[in-house]
Image (cartoon, coloured by chain):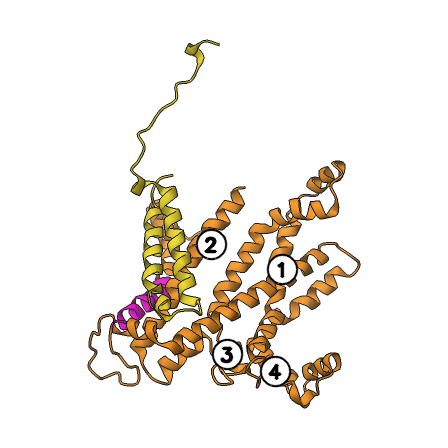
Chain colours: A yellow, B orange
Amino acid sequence: MTDLTRTPTKTSPKRPFFFRRGPMETIATVLIATGFLMLFQPFALVLYTYSLVTLLAGTVMFIIVSKFPE
Amino acid sequence: MATPAPIARRVRGLSDRAIAWAFIAPAITLLLAINIFPLLWAIYLSFTNYRANRPNAAVEGVGLRNYERVLTDPEIWQAMQTTAHFVFWTIVLQTVIGFALAYLIDRKFRGHAFWTTIILIPMMLSPAVVGNFWRFLYEPQIGLFAYAASMVTGIPTSEIRMLGDVSLAPWAIIIVDTWMWTPYVMLICLAGLRSIPDYIYEAAEVDRASAWRQFWSITVPMALPFIMLAVLFRGIENFKMFDMVTLLTGGGPGSVTEVASITLKRAAFESWATGRASAFAIILFVAVFGLANIYVKALNKVKQR
């Protein structure tokens, strides 16, 4: 087989980290899960106090980044 | 019957898009009026000092004070832990028992349709009815539950106070919820098990896979999206659990069964702190919404496998 028959592969420029759906969705998921655990944990009141901020940050981030192209 | 000519003419003049909008407009209007508007209104109220028992009093903005109070209140924190305990155990028990029942019913033994109907009965009852008759069942002196428990454990019936004992009351509610909603989980799991094609099991038989191996490599992975869906539905529903707890214990003894929705109702309709109650409701909403988001993502991943 010669090189002429090989289909050229397109190399699209890589998006910056903050605009990549995969890793950003993972970060948002971790934030939501952490916030959720903080809200319902029985160990420290301070964690409960900051749970909403964590949850909200994760949820808003998830809504935004889930609109990014794959 | 043919469409009357004037209507047909009028419809013919509309684009497909306009017709589509005309069809969904009533549903969207209802959704906006019943769901979206109250949500936005609750968000607004959560930043005010509004009290529903004083509708004519001046409403003032209090910034984030309501959220601050809810998130630093040890009693509300305790209610969150009670909710988490309740949700965790009901989901674990309902999923395990529901899947086991579905697996048995799927064997298609003689009379399986009859037993399916019998198992589904608790789900069809009203929570008010279930709450009331389980209160009778839990009665220490005359209740069947106390009688049966006494026979098994040897403890006198008068000492088996399921609804009055601090350590037993949370479990009493978990048992009732599991009894009532396991059939629902079973039904969803059964749909999942019935959707697995027989030829996959036949191929596994040819490959001499053991029944254990077939269960873990075919049955569980293929029924997993259905199980996850059942967990999602029950999880969302149990975070809002109110009726059963109110009927069985009313949050007592003390406040050991006071789940978040009961605390919320007390803040809203006993203390009349509508603004604070709205803030609490929004916090619960954000928690369930956030979790549902990541759960749906996980569900889609499992489906794509």
Q: Is residue B103 above or below residue B280?
A: above
Using the image, tell me which numbered label, if any, was put on residue B46. none
For mark 2, give the secondary structure: helix
Using the image, tell me which numbered label, if any, was put on residue B187. 1
For the residues beneath circles 3 and 4, the answer to whether they share a chain is yes
For the residues beneath circles 4 and 2, the answer to whether they share a chain is yes
Cα separation, mark 3 vs mark 1, equals 29 Å
Q: Earlier in the sequence, mark 1 or mark 4?
A: 4
Cα separation, mark 1 vs mark 4, equals 29 Å
Cα separation, mark 1 vs mark 2, equals 21 Å
Say which chain tag 3 marks.
B
Q: Please give the residue where the numbered disc 4 appears in the rendered image.
A: B162
- Residue A36 vs residue B186, the one in the foreground: A36
Cα separation, mark 4 vs mark 2, equals 34 Å
Q: Which residues are magenta?
A: B30-47
Quadrant including the C terminus of chain B: top right
Q: Earlier in the sequence, mark 4 or mark 2?
A: 4
Say which chain tag 1 marks.
B
Say which chain tag 2 marks.
B
Asked where in the image residue B288 lies, by quadrant, the reply is: bottom left
Tell me whether circle 3 and circle 4 mark residues in contact (CB < 8 Å).
no
For the residues beneath circles 1 and 2, the answer to whether they share a chain is yes
For mark 3, give the secondary structure: loop
Nearer the observer: mark 3 or 1; the answer is 3
